[in-house]
Image (cartoon, helix red, strand yellow):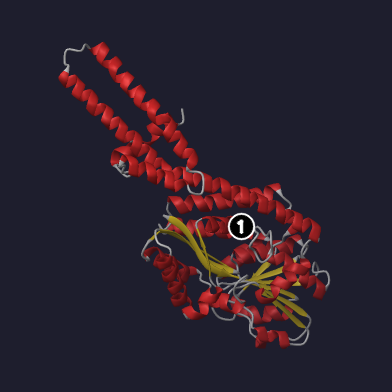
Amino acid sequence: MSILAIGLSHRTAPVALLERVSVSGDALLKLLRDVQRASCVAETMVLSTCNRVEVYAVVDRFHAVVNEVSELLSVHSGVPVEQLAPHLYVHYEDRAVEHLFSAGAGLDSMVVGEGQILGQIRQALKLAQDQGTMGPTLNELVQQALRVGKRSHAETGIDRAGASLVSVGLTLAERVLGPIRDRRALVVGAGSMSALSAATLQRAGVTDIVVVNRTHERAVRLAQTVGGRAAEFGDLTAELAQADLVVSCTGATDLVITADMVTPREMFLLDLALPRDVDPAVRRLPGVTLVDLESMQEGAAEAGADDGGRLEAISEVRGIVADEVRAYLSAERAARVTPTVVALRSKAADVVETELGRLAGRVPEIEGRIRDEVAQTVRRVVDKLLHEPTVRVKQLAESPAGDHYAEALRELFNLDPKVPDAVRRTETIDMEVDR
């Protein structure tokens, strides 16, 4: 079984296409289940954020799964495969591991170094666990990606070099509005991104924060955390007329803020939703500035930290990712050979017990003490003969061609690494091999 990653992101697709492919809520659940039902797929997870949609899967076929997942993304988005395919990237085995680790470390984000991706990966992991599509291989990979992300933020200056989309957006807002601490801010939505937006506004010194959400109770809870107030969703137009700075990030599939809801005046709108919340037509209104994900990348680069510190931090994180990828692949290759080693030891143990049984039948007069000594001697001889080959094959398995050594053992000794006895003896035999 091998690891496959297929998807598209802000690096390969325009925002308009990402909007169409993006999935959330019930649509995300359905895509996850459909991929799991695809042929040759043993485990799967879907990572859908504001700037990427990626499917990770453990598969035993490559081309067939790539075609099926591409078709599913097409069906769920309504985008024909021939239009979608040029924007899709496919990573397999080592490259899939490296891609997820890089994403977890923030290297593949629109704003390099932002830490929000870790929360998004955790959400994708939990959803897959809850839906039963997460198995041991993918679970270990994703857990390791989360550890790589934490290590990158703990050991480097990537946090200082990067920023969240919200922070970058507020930096751009200050260029338009001047200091924002005395401005009235309106947060539309009450999800994780909206909560981050409200908290970032509060840290920036904004004291007049209003939260609007379709579910009023959630708006109330979020507003309370930042000392703001909640307004009914039906009052959105009236609240827009009073706001200087608007941050919108809902899960709506249609526009939430249209041009006829906005009063022409000095005003800054930050649209972090995918699909977008704000009608691009508001840009034509006098005095109104709209920044959305399509224009965010250029703004992120302008608002980033000094190039020297930023590049140094990115370089350090890339080093961490490279080290962690090597360690993961080495351990994973070594683990692959374990069933073969177990099967070899199991077969040898069966042969020993069979021959000792024959000896007891042929020479029943051997007294117990001598019989035990003979048995121990035979077992020690077999253990010593097998110790070096089994340790060596585990070491060799860590190389890129490691699977070939395990395959050679299986052929030479006619082994079946899946036999029940071998599985039951795994723990005991592993201890013997590591002696």
User: Where is residue 182, by image quadrant?
Assistant: bottom right
Judging by the rendered image, the residue that carries numbered circle 1 is 102
Report whether 204 appears left or right of 261.
right
Residue 79 in view (yes/no): no
Residue 67's x, y, as percent?
43, 71
Q: Whole-percent x and y of residue 234?
A: 60, 79
Name above or below for residue 184 compared with residue 123.
Answer: below
Under circle 1, the secondary element is helix
How many callouts does the rendering have?
Answer: 1
For the question of whether residue 62 can be seen, the reply is yes
Q: Image check: 420 left or right of 126? A: left
Residue 170, image x and y in percent?
75, 68
Q: Residue at x 57, y 60 (%)?
A: 120
In this rendered view, identify the residue nearer to me: 67 or 399: 399
Q: Residue at x 26, y 12 (%)?
A: 370
Compared to residue 178, the image places residue 392 above or below, namely above
The image quarter in which residue 37 lies: bottom left
Q: Nearer the viewer, residue 396 or 299?
A: 396
Q: Residue furthest right?
A: 178
Percent coordinates x, y for residue 187 in the rendering: 66, 71
Q: Amino acid at mark 1?
A: Ser
Q: Nearer the viewer, residue 168 or 414?
A: 414
Mark 1, Cα crowd under 10 Å, few <14 / some 14-19 / many 20+, is many
Q: Residue at x 62, y 47 (%)?
A: 323
The reply, left or right, for residue 277 in relation to residue 304 is left
Q: Nearer the viewer, residue 320 or 54?
A: 320
